[in-house]
Image (cartoon, rainbow, N blue to C red):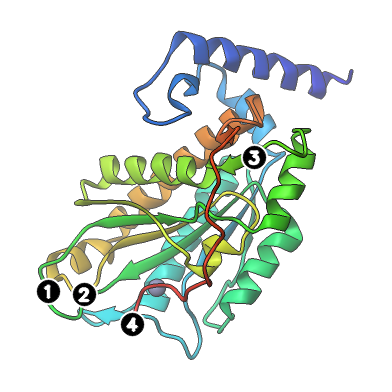
Amino acid sequence: MSPVTAIRYAVSYAASAGALLCLTQVPGIWAKQAASLAYQPSDVTLVMQEFTVVLDAGHGGIDGGTQGEGILEKNLSLAITRRVEKHLAAAGIRTLMTRRDDTYVALEKRADFSNRHQPDAFVSIHLNADATTGNTSGLETYYCSRKRLGDMMRLRERLDLPKDEAIRDRRSEWLADILHKGIQATTGAENRGTRDSNYLVVMNTECPAVLIECGYLTNTAEARRLEDEAYQEKIAAAITDGLRRFLLASRMNPRRGIERNALAVAMPGPALEDGNP
Ligand SMILES: [Zn+2]
C-alpha cells in the first residue's frame, strides 16, 4: 500500500467514524448516513483529487436563455459556473465545463460530454423567469429520478448488485437535496423546493445530476442580488461545499442513495428542454 493509499484509507475510516458520531437531519433513505467532516482539510483535498465534476453553464451563443432587468441568462449562468469552477479547483476537485465561453452547445451534446467523461456528478446552472408576474423569486433545484434502463444495468454491475433485483437510483435526488439546502441557507433565497423532472441534461446524464435555477431574473430585487459578485460567490461556495460532502459520502458508501428491492419504477417519458422560455 502506497503512503497515499494509506492516507486515503485512514481518511475513509475517520470519515466513517465521524458519520456515526454526527447524524444530521437529512430526510429520506440517506438520513442515517450523513457524514461530518471530522478530518483534516489536507487529507480531504487528497481524496478530492480523485473526483471529477462536470459543470454546465446553461444556454450560450444563439441561445440566450431567459432575460430580465437587463441581464441575459447565458451570461450570468456562465459567470456563476466559472466561480463554481474556481471553488472546486481550490478544493482539489477536477472540473470539466460543457462550455467556457459564449458558444452554443446542444443539450444532447452536454449530456454526451458528461457521459463520455464519466464524472462523479453533473451540475447545470440556470436562471429563471416568470413571464406572467415579476413577483416570483427563489431557488429551484431539479433532478431526474428515471435514468435510462442501460444506465441502471451498468450501475447494477458497478455496484455488484444482483441482476434480478429491482433498484432505484436516488443519488440525484440526494445531491439535489444537499445543494439546494446549502445554497438556500447561505443566500437566504426563497425556497421553491427540489423537483423531479425530465429535463434533458439531468435525465440523459448517467451520473448523479442536478439543474439549479439560481433565481428569477424577472424579479427586480432578486436580479440585483444575482448580479452581485458577493452573492454569486455565496452560491459557488455552497455548491462546492455540498459537492464535497456528497462525493465523500458516496465514496464511503457507493451504494448510498441506491434504493434496493425497489417497487416498480415507471419508465421515463421523453426528455424535455429546460423550463425556461
Ligand atoms: Zn435556463
Asked if labels 2 and 4 touch by Cβ distance under 8 angstroms, the answer is no
Mark closer to the observer (3, 2): 3
Which of the two labelled residues, at mark 4 and mark 3, occupies the earlier sequence position? Answer: 3
Q: CA distance from mark 3 to mark 2?
A: 39 Å
* Residue situated in front as seen by the camera: 244 or 261: 261
* Residue situated in front as seen by the camera: 31 or 82: 31
Element on which disc 4 rests:
loop
Identity of the residue furthest to the bottom in this view: 62
- Residue under the image location 69 percent in, 67 percent down: 113
**Tag 1 residue:** 134
Element on which disc 2 rests:
loop
Asked if labels 3 and 1 touch by Cβ distance under 8 angstroms, the answer is no
What's the residue type where badge 1 is placed? Gly
* Residue situated in front as seen by the camera: 111 or 163: 163
As drawn, 87 above or below 40: below
What's the residue type where badge 3 is placed? Ala
Element on which disc 3 rests:
loop
**Tag 2 residue:** 130
- Residue under the image location 25 percent in, 74 percent down: 129
**Tag 3 residue:** 166
